[in-house]
Amino acid sequence: MYTAGTESFLRQAREIQDDELKKFISRIHSFLQNQDLGSETIDCLQRLLLIVSATKYRRKLDSKFVELLQTVLYLPKSSEQVQTLCAAILRETSPYSDLSLSWDKIQDTRLLSLVFPIMLAQGSKMEDIEAVGQHVVKILEGRLPEGPNARHLLPLLSKVISLAPASLNEDQINLLSKRMVDWLRYASVQQGVPQTSGGFFNPRARQPGPIAEVDGTVATDFFTVLSVGQYYTEDQWLNMQTFSILRKWLLCYGSDGANSPNSDDKSEVDGSIVSMVSVTSSSSRLLPPKERLREKAFEYCQRLIEQCNRRALKKADAELQKACLVEAITIMDIICRQDSSYVYRSLSCLKNLHSRISGDLSYARVLLPIAQFFLNHSETAAVDSEAVYKHLFTKVPAQLFHSPMLAYEFIQFCRHNLPLFAESVSIFHQNTPNIFKFLAWNSPALVAEYMDILPALLGPDTALEIFHLLLDLPCLAAALDVQLRSPQTPLSERTPLDPSSKPTTCQEALRHPEYRGLFQYLLRAELGPGEPGRLAPARQLLGSVATSPRVVQCAESVPVLLQLFFGVVAKFADGSLASKLVLAMLERSDQLYEVPGFKTEVYRVMSSQLPVLCKLHPSLVVELSKPLLEFSGTVTNIQNKEDIFTHVVWAIGEYASVLHDKRCTAEQINKFFEVLEAMLFEITQLRPSATVPKYSPRIIAVLMTALAKLASRSQDLIPRVSLFLSKLRTFVQSPAVVATYNADDAEAILTRATELMNLLKMPSVAQFVLTPSAEVSSPRFHRDTHTSLPLAMKTTSRLLEGGEGRGAGSVPG
């Protein structure tokens, strides 16, 4: 988050009007035209850069001003700060059709490094990018320029190989690999000297001292990025830059020829023998350039890990140690993938490192590349790495769920390794509740990542618990918030709570003996048996947190994930799992966290997926007849859960048939009929009160249709349905109902009732239309846009109405 001052500057930059901006640019124009490049000009350029970069809308500058910026950029007398600002402004406002950069005429490498990003923003052709790369390589192949100009070459090369890795030929790759070996391994171990403006010789100037380690001791080994000095020489700068691009270089150019014909044999050799042969300097110099670079890069990474064992004197150096560990382990992993003989030399080092840092949460980010290394190479080395994975998935999410950077890196690690987790790492699935803590705390930033991860977590054994986890995600976010804000006092110093008293705050509830078990289950790390229904007291206690922005944002991500959940589960769910999910939907519809708008969205998803599960497994309507009858027989469900209620009634009418389940007897159909009949009577009866409760015409139509379907399968019920439907005309035309429903709604109810009555006058036709056999309802009929239940009902109704006018004999069969 930005500070208040920064927010104010950004707001001013975004809200500046075009007229005011033109006046401001005119002022800068006069400064630059007069070559007044002092502090006032620098301040103005800084403000202009903020203005053009603070908004997503690109601000176009006048062509004459752009030309002037380019002139000042190339001006020899321009200071480095002025050139940097001019280049940044041109980059932010590009592309320009009339901007010609002429990079090939630039001799100064620092200026070239400023112009190249403008070229990219201009949309330069790949040929130009490759030409810049060739220009840089040509300089690197020869004698490097004196002074700090050499520092700008490797960053330029890094950008080129990111965009055009094929621009370098094999000879250039080998030559640069040799140079990188020299920069990595043979940089000076003496500190640099400061640049002075004095004479040729200053006897009082201190001679450069040796490079130190992060703990202050004098370095006794070669220079690395963790070596400390007051000033650095040019080859030391090249050493640090080489390390920064080493990962990219090895990924682009390190694998060619890495797998020699005997590489598999080498991997079987004892690790100590390989190590002794590899570190011999004479044999190392005989290696091809790429292999020698791998060797020296590996030694460099080992040296960094050794340096990270030292206690840094400065906090900045301690943070640098952690960043270097991440990079060094990643590079070692790449090297081992390219040449498996390095695996044995890495294992003991990384095992010791893991043992040292696993207890320190500040090193949590380092655990990810270590786990990645063991995922890639533990099978090759035949080592058990279960402890590494268990610590990562058990401890890190539970204690560092609130770290946004770690959350993103952890989830990216999971996404990258989903195929490996599916094959061999059971801990990944077992710790699903822990993994969901990152999502609960960091929604909606991680929703896209979890859309990739969720399908890999789902299976017949985990689907039901993950369904409950998704529904409880906002509640989990609230519990994590309470846990994070609770004082972390030792047990010996805590004030004991009276078990008989009710907790007054969420923090007290977290420690209260009666509710501690509920919170422990909600905050659990692993999948396990439990009853989500017993979390109702915890949801009530966390009610004060339900409207917090974090919880609301978390709740907004649940419907999207639920939709994905059902889409994946539908592919493998058997009848048993489908029944459990439908039952869970009915039960959890009363057990959701009271977040604004949350229930409505969850009900919408549940109602849309209920027909899908019933279509896949129609017999579950009979299997779950008791809970379905209880749900459909409760009037409040119509008021509070209209979508779910509608689809439950539809499922009963559609699948309560002997065609779908032989256990669906006439007695079972009668039970369904009586409950639905009572519900329709309840919502359509005329009361003496002045007002009539308004239920949607959709509910009434679905109930009427379901009753007609059931009656068509047990024809003794047809007279009851017909009598009931005939009374709906009185209901619709009563003054109270006319005042409640508009004309279109009343007409829709009456039309459906009339169509169903006409259809039930011909039981055989009613059964054909309302309960078609499998042959009749084959897929080709559903693909015909002119074939549908309403069309069949209307057609039958018209035939019957025509028959009554002309005589019964005119009605077909």
Image (cartoon, grey):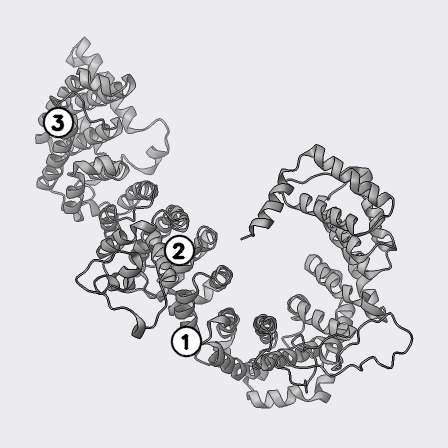
Is residue 23 positioned above or below 318 on the image? above
Rendered image: mark on residue 324: none
Name the amino acid type tagged 2.
Ala
Distance between the alpha carbons at the discs numbered 3 and 1:
65 Å
Give the class, few, some or many, for how many residues have Cα within 10 Å of label 1's Cα (few <14, many ≥20): some
Q: Is residue 670 visible?
A: yes
Q: Residue at x 44, y 75 (%)?
A: 388
Q: Position of residue 295 (x, y in %)?
A: 66, 80
Q: Earlier in the sequence, mark 1 or mark 2?
A: 1
- Mark in the foreground, 3 or 2: 2
Q: Earlier in the sequence, mark 3 or mark 2?
A: 2
Q: Which residue is mark 1?
A: 386
Q: Which residue is mark 3?
A: 721
Give the class, few, some or many, for how many residues have Cα within 10 Å of label 3's Cα (few <14, many ≥20): many
Q: Residue at x 82, y 61 (%)?
A: 109
Residue 597 is left or right of residue 10, and the answer is left
Asked whether the residues under the numbered discs 1 and 2 touch, taking CB atoms below 8 Å apart as contact, a structural biologist would say no
Of residue 671 and residue 433, the one placed in the foreground of this image is: 433
Distance between the alpha carbons at the discs numbered 1 and 2:
26 Å
Q: Position of residue 554 (x, y in %)?
A: 40, 50
Q: Classify mark 3: helix, strand or loop.
A: helix
User: Which of the image's four quarters has the C terminus?
Assistant: top left
Rendered image: mark on residue 440: 2
Is residue 417 positioned above or below 318 on the image? above
Give the class, few, some or many, for how many residues have Cα within 10 Å of label 2's Cα (few <14, many ≥20): many
Is residue 811 positioned above or below 587 on the image? above
